[in-house]
Amino acid sequence: MPEFRKDIILDEWVIIASERAKRPEMFKEEKIKIENPPGMVCPFDKGNENMTPPEILRLDINGNVIENSNPDWQIRVVPNKFPALKPLAAPGSKLYGIYSIMDGFGLHEVIINSSQHISHLSNLSKSQIRLIVDVYARRLREIKKDPRIESLIIMLNQGKDAGASLEHTHSQIFALPINSPVLEKELRGTLRYYRRHKRCAVCEILVFEAKENKRVVFENSHFVIIHPFASRNPFETWIIPKKHYPNFENIEEEEIQSFAECLKILVDFFYNELSNPSFNYYIHTGPLHTKTDHHYHWHFELIPKLSIKAGFEIATGIDICITTPEDTAKFMKEKLKI
Ligand SMILES: [Zn+2]
Ligand SMILES: [Zn+2]
Ligand SMILES: [Zn+2]
């Protein structure tokens, strides 16, 4: 059973989930490869539906929910076969000597982004990506009904260096009984900014960046793609909604369309113009039981694996970014010919 353990120095939770992987001696062996070996049957392909745990949702190409027996699916949502968290555990911490521990309660779902064996979102059309974004919002609206869930994270790992364990493109949703340390920091920082300036920090960023026009890569009716002023990574790219609201799952129909356009632009850029690096993307969305209406503004972050964090970054938490966001934004804009 996975377990939350409190780091009492940083006052942050970590998850110890040993059944996910390895006995210590296995680290002597070769690292896991993600290329499907020849002859390996992919559990996410059409026709192999019985290789995954019983599914939660199945949609056709038009976004209609269809029967589990209908073979004409485009997206399936299933529980993770090797979850980092388990739905049957009870939330609530208890003491263990000087430490705090908590059962590893939470949900861990996998969204199979396509019924075809495709390894990169770039191989999907804008309308297929729109459907994935739609599923993100649908699942979050459903999962948040459970009052034990405090926060949600949507993410995608692209490529071996980003931690993808299967090459068939898939997204993941984690539902947590706590706010993650990163979300806590964003909540604290934006609340402090709000108290000082009576404005949402992200709304302020949108106004300033539009005026300066040095780090904006693209915008459409509802979203802006930017390289953040204080980027921590080369080509770190954010998609920010123009409308202020804390929770992603409240995204509206026409915004989904607009967001999918931005996401398609991004994944195509990294695939075609930047030698297809591994990347992680995730959506930071507001907590479910903390009031954040005025100061929290949901957003999407994509972090390509183009540099390695070294001792200084790990020891201090201060990232050294080896490019300027002004240069990378300009480069990206030129390549996109926008
Ligand atoms: Zn596959
Ligand atoms: Zn805002
Ligand atoms: Zn964020």
Image (spheres, rainbow, N blue to C red):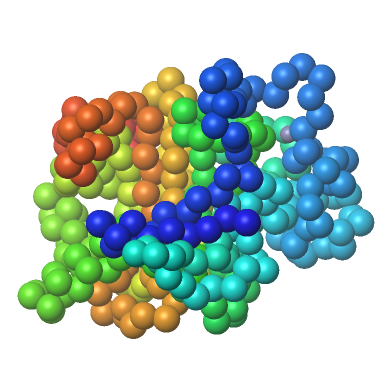
Q: Residue at x 59, y 34 (%)?
A: 23
Q: Residue 199, image x and y in percent?
A: 16, 74
Quadrant of the frame with the N terminus: bottom right
The image quadrant of residue 146 is bottom right
Q: Residue at x 12, y 50 (%)?
A: 212
Q: Residue at x 17, y 53 (%)?
A: 209
Q: Is residue 266 visible?
A: yes
Q: Residue 94, image x and y in percent?
A: 46, 72
Q: Is residue 44 left or right of residue 17?
A: right
The one nearer the camera, 3 or 197, is: 3
Residue at the front extreme? 97
The one nearer the camera, 264 or 100, is: 100
Q: Is residue 181 left or right of residue 38?
A: left
> Vertical placement of 9 versus 177: above or below?
above
Q: Is residue 215 left or right of residue 47?
A: left
Q: Residue at x 54, y 20 (%)?
A: 28
> Vertical placement of 90 versus 39: above or below?
below
Q: Residue 72, image x and y in percent?
A: 85, 49
Q: Is residue 126 visible?
A: no
Q: Residue 198, image x and y in percent?
A: 13, 79
Q: Is residue 68 left or right of residue 160?
A: right
The one nearer the camera, 241 or 318, is: 318
Quadrant of the frame with the C terminus: top left
